[in-house]
Image (spheres, rainbow, N blue to C red):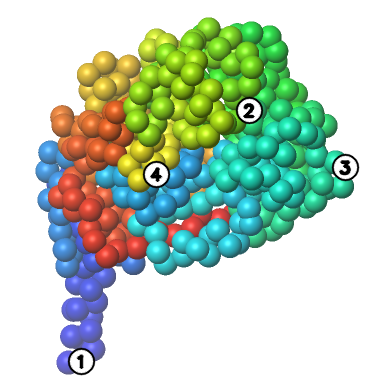
Amino acid sequence: MRLALVLLTLPLFAQTYDLAVANGRVLDPATNLDAIRHVGIRDGKIAAVSATPLAARTTIDAKGLVVAPGFIDLHSHGQTPENYRFKARDGVTTALELEVGVHPVAAWYAQREGRALINYGATSGDIPARIAVMHDSGTLLPRDRAVERAATPDEFREILDRVARGLDDGAPGIGLGIAYLPHESRAEVLSLFRLAATRKRPLFVHMRNGGPIEPGVIDALQEVLADAAATGASVHVVHITSMGLRETALCLEMIQGARARGLDITTEAYPYTAGMTDLASAIFADGWQARQGGIGFNDLQWALTGERLNADSFARYRKQGGFAAIHSIPEEIVRLALSHPLVMLASDGVLDEGKGHPRAAGTFARVLGRYVREQHSLTLMDALRKMTLMPADRLALKTKGRLAVGADADLAIFDPARVTDRATFENPAQYSDGIAYVLVNGTLVVNRGELVPGVAPGRGVLR
């Protein structure tokens, strides 16, 4: 009798899940699945994708909603609880600081372990290592010593050693912000590429120059491609539109050609016509107007107040330091990049006490609402591929960016007829709308469009 009872109850136990997502339109870019399915989750993993209903302790009825892998943001400077909340409401389940990176890596990860709403991660950064070694007063970006002079040979050896130690601690790559370090030599950049190639980790590169004025974005991209060819390093070029401006099509042609000849080069863009960076940084050294495509003071918008700048306010705020939006990217260039098959989506976002760029809060919903539903610039599946599978593959994350058995239960569940961004340049701290549920490692962090209090299921992304 006991044996019979065990045999009868085992199948029931095996088919009971912690949580089931029922009746949703499941889209998986890895397999091109687009069908009504039921998703079973157990122990933080996707355990079933079924055409028939599943028994679970908790069930979410996703009828009329899209069920997709959680969005992966490769370029998220905002690595704080405030920023994680806005990311979750935008469907992001993994937010990574890969362009600038961090130093020291181990301490940065330890600060977030067991405390993060979503998954997190960061590269071993050249910029923060230089700030530490050269005793620069900057925080996210250098402001003085690392900007005003070159590193000595001894300093660079220590910088390189610190970046390597970050890789030893599990950083998924190297962050390289060449544009913010005007005295960083081409030999130093090549050394960092060589380190990345030796350790088989990608570099995430803010190129040396942008815009059409030579030496501009074409020269800068040629440096990256040449160093990749010389070393065999894998490279991800950040925010191609704000660097390329009207040269973006040519940049994408160069990247596509390099890939066709065996180089591992990828790139990204955000769905806005304005960038943002620190006004005190090297980006705004003399001649910035021409380098940014011929814009002027009035094309800059001070993040703290929303005001457009003039010569006087520019000089005052540059001395003070702080973020300014740069309205320089043509709308047709945004559409070109978002629709290009090689371009991933990433926000380059950061909010600080509600101030910053709207991309920190609305990037992914904006693509789904404005560029998929309203403008038909790309299909829903293609947009999801750029948000999930492509960034996961860039980092060789085999259990993320997919909606399949064995993958991490990171899910974004949204209404395709209603999803939209609400963040603006004047008021960027506004949650996206139409994203009903978000799960991180099987735990609900957004439930019926509202943040779930008191949960911290995020885990560090390490190599």
Q: Is residue 79 left or right of residue 444?
A: right
Pair 3/1: label in front: 3
x 74%, y 50%: residue: 133
Q: Label 1, label 4: how many angstroms apart (C-alpha)?
A: 61 Å
Q: Which mark is residue 16?
A: none
Label 4 near label 1: C-beta < 8 Å?
no
Q: Is residue 271 at least partly visible in the picture?
A: yes
| Residue 251 visible within the image | no
- The amino acid beneath tag 3 is Pro
| First-in-chain label (3 vs 1) | 1
Q: Which of the numbered marks, if any, corresponds to residue 352?
A: 4
Work out which quarter of the rendered image holds the N terminus and state it: bottom left
Q: Which residue is mark 3?
A: 153
Amino acid type at circle 1 is Arg
First in sequence, mark 2 or 3: give its number.
3
Foreground pick, 373 / 431: 431
Q: Residues within 10 Å of mark 3 (few under 14, many from 20)?
A: few
**Which residue has dot 1 on it?**
2
Mark 3 → mark 1, Cα distance in angstroms: 76 Å
- Measuring from the top left, give residue 168's x and y in whole percent: 69, 58
- Label 2 and label 1: CA atoms lie apart by 75 Å
Q: Secondary structure at mark 3?
A: helix
Amino acid under disc 4: Asp
Structural distance between the alpha carbons of marks 3 and 4: 36 Å
Q: Determine contact: label 2, label 1, CB under 8 Å.
A: no
What residue sits right under mark 2 in the picture?
A: 282
Label 2 to label 4, Cα distance in Å? 21 Å
Above-or-below relation of 463 to 203: below
Of labels 2 and 4, earlier in sequence is: 2
Q: Please, what secondary structure does the residue beneath circle 2 have?
A: helix
Q: In the image, 44: left or right of 324?
A: left
